[in-house]
Image: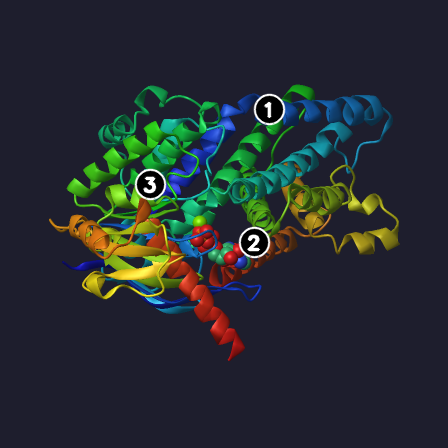
């Protein structure tokens, strides 16, 4: 698969001296859905804004469809649609005229049939003559999406599309996104919601403190997420793992035992372990299972960088 | 050139203007009518004619200039400031357009609006005073250049402004005084010599004088000088905009 977006060594230092992006490299494959996960202030919006031309890069290069976003900005930007994080719309305009405006701004000749299709797919058609200020927050976000799609982009950026949006709209949006993917549109979305990344993304990138920590296939991440642990509380604490149990992946935690196993396999080994525990003469008082979620992976990744950053500070 | 984008910006801006048609036209027309009542009928009757022209007719070019300059400036500055203020500027910045196309779209629309208002005031004037235009083509040329250059100025102000106060500061602090003191309602030759000299530093004098010449064939300053003044002013604004375009000043971080 070819890369539709390539980011190389991208840094961004704001006028105040704050470095929001630290040498970011990112390849986005043509036709994929990639979710960028990261805490507030990680640099997601800055990254998207720089790719889309709203902010200038301090250093590094970006190409979209092979076109450099600085030297060939017209060709590059023509391919891109952007749904910003903030709802920014002209309050007194009608829905349809603001969508038509977007299409024209991107150099496309008027095409009311296409605009009708976009508005219908977002359930906005019956609101087409409504003034934007009369719409609810969710409807306004649909208008932003319609504007971004008005010029038939090949790459769509959605910056926190689910922030402050009800479940119904989120589901609708996922439908639109998967239809766009079928049409061959590449989609990059940023989100706080791990379920959202899980639900629609092909790949997941984690970004924190202006750095991309990992980009991985969602399936691979899911396998990691398949790790479950079983917490075994014992009537009498043990100092060491009994010899008879050495074949199990056990660790001692707070007077109890922790057993890590893989849900993806047919045999988890739980039944055998429980039998062997009894044979070893250990009496158990309670059992709990715990699943490491994408969230935990994410949190541990992000806190690892915290540690790394602190270490750097010391040195 | 992305002509489609220029067309989009221009028609979008003009649609806003026509949607608020009433207030766009009514207020300049009413204030013009008031000027005629006060200066033309009430005071003007007791005043001698200026350079052989009845006072009511004499103030027409100045009135048009006053309206056109303030309207062009405020329309153009609001046109670009508003997207900055509400955040819709993201779309302009991410679109495949150069700053040139953005400028042509916004300034073109603001200049057209100012032109409309100028023409409406001129038409209103015919209702109140006896008026003839000696050099109609020169009149149209001066009007167009003034609309254009002050729209360019307004565009710069809109990019510079960081708040609505700043947006209004410039027109009310600089433009209105310059226009009032620039001979809108009197001939510069009526002033004491010292003030005549000072007035010559006011660029608006040259514009009003040239515009008045196109009506009556008389002027405070030579018509060539008026033409040079307005061309210089336009060139200055274009230069500043080109610099903004290059540096992304107050537009792109
Ligand atoms: N215009 C700006 N000037 C200075 N700092 C900024 C600016 N915009 C964003 N930042 C800072 O850059 C960091 C990243 O912000 P942002 O990209 O919005 O994060 P995210 O979208 O991941 O929440 C934050 O610490 C933010 O405060
Ligand atoms: Mg953000």
Chain on which label 3 sits? A
Name the element at disc 2: helix
**Along the line of sight, the residue nearer the viewer: A140 or B249:** A140
> Mark 2 highlights which residue?
B234
**Residue A311 position (above or below residue A207):** below
- Whole-Å distance between the Cαs marked 3 and 2? 36 Å
Q: Quadrant of residue B6?
A: top left
Name the element at disc 3: helix
Name the element at disc 1: helix
How packed mark 3 is, by other alpha carbons closer than 10 Å (few <14, some 14-19, many 20 or more), is many
Q: Which of marks 1 and 2 is in front?
A: 1
> Mark 1 highlights which residue?
B23
Q: Is residue A43 left or right of residue B145?
A: left
Please report the residue visible at 37 percent of the width from the left and 69 percent of the height from the top: A60
User: In x, y percent, where is residue B178?
Assistant: 74, 46
Give me the disc on residue A105: none
């Amino acid at each position: 698969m070819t890369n539709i977006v390539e980011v190389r060594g991208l840094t961004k230092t704001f006028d105040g001296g704050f470095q929001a992006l630290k040498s970011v490299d990112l390849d986005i494959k043509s036709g994929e859905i990639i979710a960028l996960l990261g805490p507030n202030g990680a640099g997601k919006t800055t990254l998207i804004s720089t790719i889309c031309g709203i902010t200038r890069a301090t250093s590094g290069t970006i190409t979209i469809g092979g076109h450099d976003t600085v030297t060939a900005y017209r060709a590059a930007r023509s391919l891109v649609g952007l749904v910003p994080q903030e709802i920014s719309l002209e309050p007194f305009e009608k829905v349809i005229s603001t969508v038509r405006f977007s299409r024209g701004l991107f150099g496309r000749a008027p095409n009311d049939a296409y605009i009708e299709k976009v508005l219908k797919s977002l359930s906005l058609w019956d609101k087409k003559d409504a003034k934007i200020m009369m719409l609810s927050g969710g409807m306004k976000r649909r208008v932003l999406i319609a504007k971004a799609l008005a010029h038939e982009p090949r790459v769509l950026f959605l910056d926190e599309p689910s922030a402050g949006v009800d479940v119904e709209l989120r589901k609708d949006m996922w439908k639109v996104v998967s239809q766009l993917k079928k049409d061959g549109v590449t989609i990059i979305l940023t989100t706080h919601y791990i379920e959202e990344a899980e639900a629609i993304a092909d790949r997941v990138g984690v970004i924190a403190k202006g750095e991309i920590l990992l980009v991985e296939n969602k399936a691979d991440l899911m396998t990691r997420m398949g790790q479950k642990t079983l917490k075994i509380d014992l009537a009498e604490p043990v100092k060491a793992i009994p010899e008879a149990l050495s074949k199990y992946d056990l660790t001692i935690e707070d007077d109890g035992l922790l057993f890590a196993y893989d849900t993806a396999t047919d045999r988890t080994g739980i039944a055998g372990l429980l039998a062997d525990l009894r044979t070893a003469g250990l009496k158990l008082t309670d059992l709990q299972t715990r699943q490491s979620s994408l969230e935990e992976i994410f949190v541990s990744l992000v806190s690892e960088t915290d540690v790394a950053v602190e270490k750097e500070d010391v040195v | 050139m992305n002509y489609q984008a220029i067309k989009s910006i221009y028609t979008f801006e003009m649609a806003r203007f026509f949607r608020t048609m009433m207030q766009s036209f009514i207020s300049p027309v009413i204030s013009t009518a008031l000027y005629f009542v006060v200066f033309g009928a009430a005071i003007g009757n007791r005043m001698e004619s200026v350079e052989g022209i009845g006072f009511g007719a004499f103030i027409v070019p100045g009135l048009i200039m006053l309206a056109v300059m303030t309207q062009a400036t405020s329309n153009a500055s609001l046109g670009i400031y508003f997207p900055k203020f509400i955040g819709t500027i993201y779309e302009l910045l991410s679109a495949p357009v150069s700053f040139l196309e953005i400028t042509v779209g916004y300034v073109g629309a603001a200049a057209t609006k100012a032109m409309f208002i100028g023409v409406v005031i001129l038409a209103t004037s015919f209702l109140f005073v006896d008026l003839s235009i000696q050099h109609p083509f020169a009149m149209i040329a001066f009007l167009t250049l003034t609309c254009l250059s002050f729209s360019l100025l307004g565009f710069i102000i809109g990019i510079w402004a960081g708040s609505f106060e700043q947006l209004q500061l410039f027109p009310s602090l600089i433009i209105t005084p310059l226009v009032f003191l620039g001979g809108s309602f009197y001939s510069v030759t009526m002033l004491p010599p010292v003030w005549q000299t000072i007035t010559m530093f006011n660029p608006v004098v040259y514009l009003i004088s040239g515009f008045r010449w196109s009506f009556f064939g008389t002027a405070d300053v030579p018509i060539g000088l008026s033409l040079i003044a307005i061309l210089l002013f336009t060139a200055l604004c274009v230069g500043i905009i080109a610099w903004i375009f290059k540096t992304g000043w107050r537009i792109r971080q």
